[in-house]
Image (cartoon, rainbow, N blue to C red):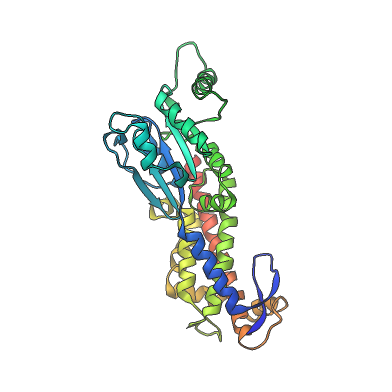
Amino acid sequence: MYGRILLNDTYEVKDMSIYDDIEKIKKQIEEENSEPLKIALFGQPGAGKSSIINKLVGERVAKTGASTDVTTEADFIPYEGLLLVDLPGYGTSKFPPNEWMSQFNPKEFDLFLCVFSGKFHEADTRFFKELQESGKVCLFVRNMSDQLWEDGKTLEELKQDIIDDVEKQVGSRQNVYFTSCRTSTGFDSLQDAIQESLEPAKKEKYIRYAKAYTVEHLEQKREECKKLVTKYAAIAAANGINPVPGVDISVDLSVMLKLFSQINKAYGLNDAKLALLEGALLPVAKKVLDYATKEGLSLLLKRFATKTALKNSSKYVPIVGQVIAASAGYAMTYKAGIHYLDDCHELATEVLKKELQ
């Protein structure tokens, strides 16, 4: 069966077999979710690698205070489409360099973060050079920067001393990102650096699931979530197994609920963050919670299944037969998905403003 259907948020119209195209979208989603983005953190015990992992995703996913030098096991921490790995101590008596490199193949990871909080160690230098030879990207993170102090020197002078020391140790000029997990400073720049170090597909995944520290980060997150809306709305419309009450259109509610869950996770809108909201945003927060249920979703879909909505969509979808139902369903599911995304984005923006205060 052939026809024409909306494919993206720019309302591009494309001839296709609707069923073939839906299968392609499903396959694309499966491929995107099949392999997580892998970021490995290494450095000396006590540098705060676990705390940095928690800051990168905005959740307490890693246990803090534990030293990785007492074990030969890496701490693998999955978070949505990410896999963050706290690597054990490199070049110690428990784990000599040759054994380390044979067990933890650098080629398996997309990015490395070298985390230190004091003097840069020779073992870190050796490992960095191994990564260079393997063609891997490594970012240097000087954690606990809020503790930097020396009588007679400014903060900028102290930071420059650290940058110079890293250059001396590794033999080349490197950007050093200064962070503090206590004050949350420096993570805006670190997140930008991580994004720019990843290939496009991995960058999109990182933007979607990493914590936003700036309004710009949230805008990037919204653009990535719009891509999810486009894909999931098409699948929900094509499956068409649940009639929408009061409307002669059926969609797959389970697909839409999964979409809403993905958007919610991308923005990290957990109960603790929603508790920060007050006043005029409380009704919006309630809607976000209600729409994530089957009953609430049905009401939202019905809201967009008006003659006006379908009429506006029809000029982009000149089709016949069963494809009409799928296209009408897409107009409804896409608009509902964007509405939910806008609500989540509004809430996340307010949460971020409160956090920055």
Q: Nearer the viewer, residue 179 or 28?
A: 28
Q: Is residue 103 above or below residue 140?
A: below
Q: Is residue 61 above or below residue 265?
A: above
Q: Nearer the viewer, residue 210 or 303?
A: 210
* Residue at 37% across, 48% down: 77
* Residue at 57% across, 25% down: 173
- Image position of 16 (left or right of 54): right
- Image position of 242 (left or right of 90): right
Q: Nearer the viewer, residue 166 or 332?
A: 166
Question: How far across and down, in percent of the image, does residue 131 sit?
Answer: 48, 36
- Residue farthest to the bottom? 321
The answer to which quarter of the image holds residue 323 is bottom right
Q: Nearer the viewer, residue 132 or 308?
A: 132
Residue 342 seen by the camera: no
Count of all numbered marks drawn on residues in the image: 0
Question: How far across and down, in percent of the image, does residue 19 sit?
Answer: 58, 79
* Residue at 41% across, 52% down: 79
Question: How far across and down, in percent of the image, does residue 327 sit?
Answer: 62, 79
Question: How far across and down, in percent of the image, does residue 90 sit?
Answer: 36, 32
Q: Is residue 125 above or below residue 105?
A: above
The answer to which quarter of the image holds residue 318 is bottom right
- Residue farthest to the top? 152
Residue 292 seen by the camera: yes
Q: Is residue 120 above or below residue 348?
A: above
**Quadrant in the picture for the N terminus:** bottom right
